[in-house]
Amino acid sequence: MKIEANRDICIGAGNCVLAAEDVFDQDDEALVVVLSDQPSDDQTTEVRNAVAQCPSGALSLVEG
């Protein structure tokens, strides 16, 4: 699984950081920063929750 983030549509809500703080952060403009685009197996549930909770749809997962 690979994480993709579209910073052009990110609204800076921060739900991703709350759901998976080891994988996501925010920059000075509050836009998403992916710290690890290939999360470990034990982070999978947190990452899926972060993607599902993103209000702008800026996050997506690519399986494979």
Image (spheres, grey):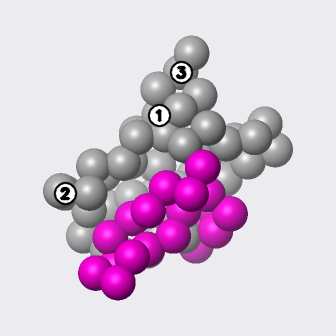
* Residue on which disc 3 sits: 63
Q: Position of residue 63 (x, y in %)?
A: 53, 21
Residue depicted at x 46% and y 49%: 52
Residue depicted at x 55% and y 43%: 37
Please tell me the numbered disc located at residue 9.
Answer: 2
Dot 2 falls on a residue whose secondary structure is loop
Dot 3 falls on a residue whose secondary structure is loop
Please tell me the numbered disc located at residue 61.
Answer: 1
3 up-or-down from 62: above or below: below
* Residue 62 left/right relative to 45: left
Q: Position of residue 57 (x, y in %)?
A: 30, 50
In the image, what residue type sits under mark 1? Leu
The quarter in which the C terminus is drawn is top right
Residue range in magenta is 18-36
Separation of marks 1 and 3 at Cα, in angstroms: 6 Å
Magenta stretch: residue 33 in it? yes
Magenta stretch: residue 39 in it? no
